[in-house]
Image (cartoon, rainbow, N blue to C red):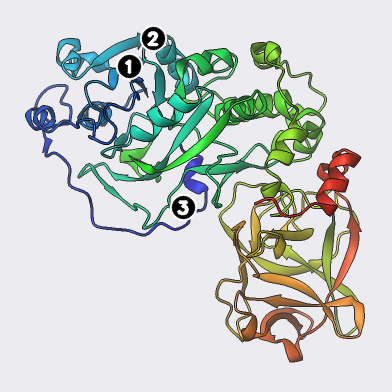
Amino acid sequence: DEKAKMCQKKGVIPQKAIAAPKIKSLQNKPNAVKKLDERRIKEERAQIPPDIKGKGYNLTLSVVLPCGFEHDTFVRTAHSIFAETPAEILKEIVLVDDASEPRLDSMWSQEEAAEFNVKYVRLDQPAGLIGAKQAGAEAATGDIIVFFDCHVKPARGYWIPYVIAVHENYKRVVVPTITSLNIDSWTEFNRPTSSGGGMSKCYLTFDAEFKWTTDNTPYVPIMSGGLLAISRKWFFEIGGYDSSMKGWGGENLDQSLRIWTCGGEIVSAPESFVAHMWRDGTAKTKAKYKLGAGDAIKNRARAVKAHLGPWYEKTLTFPSFNQWKGVDLDTSSITDAFADLHCENFEWYLNRFKHIYRDAGVVPKEVFQIKGETSSGSSVCLQLKSMGWTNYGSADEIILADCKGGHTEPKSQWWHISSRLQDGSCCGSLRAWNTDQCVDGRNPVLGHTTIKTYTCDLDSGVEAVLEPAEGDDDEFLMKIGRNKSQNSCISLEDDTTLKIVNCASASKWTKGNAFTPIEYELLSEKTKNEWENDIVTL
């Protein structure tokens, strides 16, 4: 979940905190642990709603909590799950103590925990998040395994979409809407005001990152990682978590790609809210477990090598994966796990989510420099100020730089069209190639000389476009802004300054050194023809 905090949040606004059982402070006692009001939890425990009871949704849940050194939150998390899950539905809470010191059951005894359907699985050697989740799954006996982090608070009724969805299709995986948890008051905040808000779905980028996104479908291309519900049968059919991955990171990519390509599906549940403590850099939210050096990047490399086929070569062009060039990375523990399931290849996946990869321009057909001409006749190019090739970003700004001759150097001086228009077709924005940054056209102000970028909104509509100049198809106005009537453009002023001006007085731009990138070239001719001639799919 550390990686998830960097993703863009859409449609989320703060709202009044939701009431929670009173926290019982035991901090003045040895091995103190924070608890909720246990009597109140039992008295006010959730019941099966009348409209659900009797419909045959009789699947049970095993909630797996990987808890490595989560002494401050593990009891409150278990209490909250118990309180919000009816007795007939909750088979057990499998609390995996990943070599915590002191032991978690020394702070909350097995006898006390058993009153709340908790059973401990103790790992004496640290397995990391992935290994702890696998150990919990192997100990689970319910029909559905729910993986939660050890610092969450589910809302009332959170479980209903899980049992309905899996009852209809055991290969269907469900992801809740993730909100925020104040761990001091143990209350939820940042609940979305409408369905489609919140955080539930991500998409895959070629440097094995994942970015939050929204659209009007229920389908989730990539899970963020920690929070999901999956039938125990399907989890083990696709081979569970990769035994060769260490610590955390990359398992969400592997699992998501296995699920989709091997015949399953992942859906979001807009009405299932789970409040989550984000790692915000403060001491109280900092992870206490230790990561092995390079574990996360190796996990991600393994995931994409196992699933991306020839597109793995694209991954190796990113600086963070330089160490894996020429290395025979063994991914047989992944591929052997689902070898008998007759899974589809990665091009199938790109086609399945072409509303992202084609219609939102994530796999561009053309990449180019954006060139301006100075008064002396020399060229300058638009470039990101700080970011190189990575999709692990948040915001940047555009500067003028000397134009580079080739596109193999990891400089963010190459651009392509991106992000869906209102009708779902491509494209209404400009994205720096091999990054997650798009020109920020949300609120341009005439006269401003700082041109910002932000994490691309794949549903931005018209935001920043190169529009052919009147009478010359080789020159363009660079229009910016979601309000077309504003008529604002980015202009080169005094040879050295970028400025937002009225388009009537704006300088012209040209495309330089355009080429077709490898991620598009690798598509089959059949897919290329379909993408160029097909109608919008979203």
Q: Earlier in the sequence, mark 1 or mark 3?
A: 1
Q: Residue furthest bottom?
A: 505
Using a 10 Å C-alpha cutoff, classify the residue at mark 3 as few (fewer than 14 neighbours), some (14 to 19) or many (20 or more): many
The residue at the point 22 percent across, 43 percent down is 184
Q: Residue at x 46, y 16 (%)?
A: 232
Q: Say what secondary structure mark 1 lies in.
A: strand
Q: Secondary structure at mark 2?
A: helix
The residue that label 3 is drawn on is 196
Q: Element type at marker 3? A: loop
The mark that comes first in sequence, 1 or 2, is 1
- Which is more toward the observer, 9 or 297? 9
Q: In 3D space, how far apart are the residues under numbered discs 1 and 3 (Cα atoms)?
A: 31 Å
Which of the two marks, 1 or 3, is nearer to us in this view? Answer: 3
Q: Position of residue 486 (x, y in %)?
A: 62, 85
Residue holding disc 1: 94
Q: Amino acid at mark 1?
A: Val
User: Which of the pair 293/357 is nearer the observer?
Assistant: 357
**Callout 1–callout 2 Cβ contact below 8 Å:** yes
Which circle's residue, 2 or 3, is located before the other in the chain? 2
Q: Dots 2 and 3: beta carbons under 8 Å?
A: no
User: Does residue 148 appear in this view?
Assistant: no
Nearer to the camera, 232 or 134: 232
Q: Which mark is residue 416?
A: none
Q: Nearer the viewer, residue 492 or 134?
A: 134
What residue sits 41% from the left and 20% below the top? Answer: 145
In the picture of the structure, the residue carrying the numbered disc 2 is: 139
